[in-house]
Every structure is written in C-alpha cells, then in structure tokens.
Amino acid sequence: MGALNDIQIRHWIKAAAPVAKSDGDGLTFTLSAAGTASWVLRYRYGGKQREKTIGKFPDISLKKARELASADRVRIQQGMDVGREKQIEKHEQIKAMTVKSLVADYEEKVLPGLASSTGVSRRQKIRTYIFPAIGHLTARDVSGADLVDLLERVNAKHPKQVKEVLSVVKTIFDHAQSKKIIDINPAVGISHKAISGVAGRAGSTRIMLNDDEIKALLTALGKANRTVEFVTRILLSTAVRIQALMLAEWAHVDFEKKTWLIPPGDGRKSIREFVVPLTEQVIGYFQELKKIAGRSDYVVPVIKKRKEGDYPMQPGSVNHALERVCADLGDKIRAFSPHDLRSTARSHLGALGVPVAIAERCLNHTLGGLIAVYDQHDYLVERRKALEQWSTKLDILEKIHNNVVMLNQVA
C-alpha cells in the first residue's frame, strides 16, 4: 500500500496517456484514452479475478480511495463479492426508474437513430398523452390496466391518435425490457381497435371542421409557428393537397395574375397541371411565407438545412405541429390531419351553395364519365368566385363570434 502520491497522479493526467498504476494490495489508478481517471479495486473471489470501480478521481481522492478499498477488503474476507453487490445495487436503481426517467434514456439512445420527423412525433405524444397519465409511476409497476386507462383518455378526445400513442408506448417499454427493467412489456396484447374501434382505424371518415372548430383553429394559429400558421391557412383556404404545397416553388406562384400553378406528378397526385386561383387573403399568406423562405426556391423550405442545400419541408412536420395545436385546444376541436382541411373546405363550399362541378374542380377532382369527356372547361373564373366566397366566410369566422349568415350563391 502507498505506492502512489498526488503529484504522480496529476502528472499522468496532464500527460493524457492511458495508464494503470497500482497503489498496492489491489487498488489501481487508471486513466483511459478519453481522459477518465478512476480508482479500481482488483481482487479474487471464488478463485476468479474480479474488480470493482470505486469511483472517479478527483471526486474521490487518493486518501479516500484507500479508505474505501480497505473497507471492501474486509468485506471480501468475510465472503462477500463487493463488485457483484455494486452491480446488483446499480441494477436495482435502474429498475426503480420512473417512466419519465425511462423515457429520458429512451430519447437519448433510441430516437437519434430515427428520422427527425418520427422523433418529433414521438416526443409530442409522450409529453401530450403519456407523461400526464403515467409519467410519475415506476416503470416496472406500470400494468396493462394503466395503459388501457391512458388510451381510453386519449380516445375520449382524439380517437385517431390511439393507434400511434399505443405504438409509442410499446416501443418505450420494449426499451425497458431490453434493459431488463421489466420482464414483460405491459403493452403486449393491447389492441387499438379494442379502445377506439372504427374511429381509430386508417381510412375512417374524414373530419369536416364546423364553424366553431374553425374559429378556434384560426385563433390558435396566431400562437403557432408562423410557417405552420400560413401553411395551414393556405391549405384551408385553397383545398389543395399538402404534398402540392410542400413541393411548391416560387416560380409557379404568380402574384400579378393571382394564380398558383401545380405541375403534374412528383408526389402531387395530379395527372395534369392545375391552376389554383388565389384570393387576396391567400396572396397575403404566400407573401408572408416569401419573407420566411428568403432565397429558397421553395415556398416552404427547411430552414435548418439551408447550409446543406435547398430542401422543401416534409408534410409530417406540419402534421406534428397541428397535433400540438389540437392538443392545446382540447375539447374545442376534434383531432384532424392536413387532409381534413381539404375535406372541410369541400363541405363548406357545398354549404355555401357552390355547384358540385365547381366545388369538385376546386379540389382538382376529375368530373368523371361523360362530363369529363365533353366538358373540358376548367371553371377558373367560377372557382375563383367560389374560393373568394370561402375566404370571406373564413374572415368572418375569425373576426366575429356570432353565427355566420349564408352568403350569396355562386352564379
């Protein structure tokens, strides 16, 4: 004992070269290539060489390391495996993790390997739905009944979110199972259909937001990210598909003619080019996006990737942002997707008396049958009047709180 001194230790640390120096009787000072200085006690137990990490230097001084090593040697002589005891104690601490602590470990080790949009979506669901219900519980004490109760709460407000929340819960507890914090994943055997039924299935009926829900949405958008605000307003006002707006380029937006040309294909789901008439309100939304986009060729670029190149924003980013808006609004609005804004516009166009043919062309739907064969007119003028009428109603819904009077029908 006593082969080392503080001057030697500090010299080795300053030299920054990996070392392992014995102080005697099993106590060893180690310095890793990464510069981590630690105290290790090496001993024999059951005829096998073992070791225990006592702690890091300088948190534990040379004098303190000798005291702890001496105490451990006494226990070893009494037949105790001190290294094994520390491992068991550490694992017991891990098994006592709360769900919040488990999620922190999950987000650190699992989410970086996923797509950024997936990470954003999972974090949002964790904080909106999972933490309020079970975040305070010890992870190993969470039961299937706890998760069913969590999902029932989600279903009460946002039935379409049940399937995705269940998926996130399963992956979190898969992580816990991999770390041996739990033996069985409590989410196994739970079906989203048993919770939400038809409402939670893909392909269920589209949401058409009513007047009160639109009022709540338009008010809430003022507090949202500005890009998301104007993207949402454009989607609601024009009834276009979100893919078309995410791929839109400034070269296709004509502020003088008040039109936006959507080219065919490339994820836009259009077999031929389509001209969208822009109302004064929508022109204003595009102008705001122009300020945000700067020199990008895209109407809605990814700002963070500007140094790597020019990229359009992914639809998932808008989806996730609108999920947060819906969560904040609670009972004031049903959970909806960007595509539901398209359905909402179509429903209100019909309620405003817009003829079916014009309303369908506003959505870039083909008219089908003999109409498609003999009627090649694209109703640009009529569509502009219809969308102006719709924009006017949206203005009224945002500015006043009484019932909206039916506007004059499109001629």
Image (tube, rainbow, N blue to C red):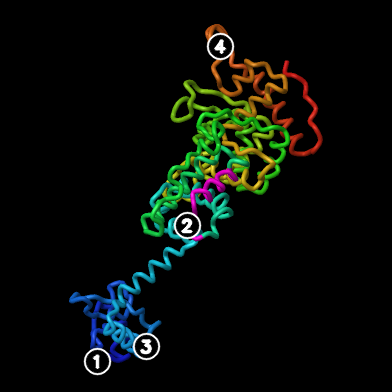
Q: Compared to 385, does 132 lie above or below?
A: below
Task: Provide the residue designation for mark 3.
Answer: 64
Q: Which mark is residue 3?
A: 1
The quarter holding residue 408 reads top right
Q: Residue at x 56, y 49 (%)?
A: 129
Q: Which quadrant would the N terminus be assigned to in this image?
A: bottom left
Spatial CA span between label 2 and label 3: 35 Å
Q: Residue at x 32, y 90 (%)?
A: 6
Q: Residue at x 76, y 34 (%)?
A: 396
Which class describes the residues within 10 Å of circle 2: few (<14), some (14-19), or many (20+)?
many
Residue 75 x %, y %: 31, 83
Please report whichever mark, 1 or 3, sits nearer to the chain's N-terminal start: 1
Task: Provide the residue designation for mark 4.
Answer: 376
Q: Residue at x 44, y 42 (%)?
A: 189
Residue 258 x %, y %: 63, 29
The magenta segment: 138-154
Which class describes the residues within 10 Å of circle 4: few (<14), some (14-19), or many (20+)?
few
Task: Provide the residue designation for mark 2.
Answer: 103
Amino acid type assigned to the residue bearing label 3 in the image: Lys
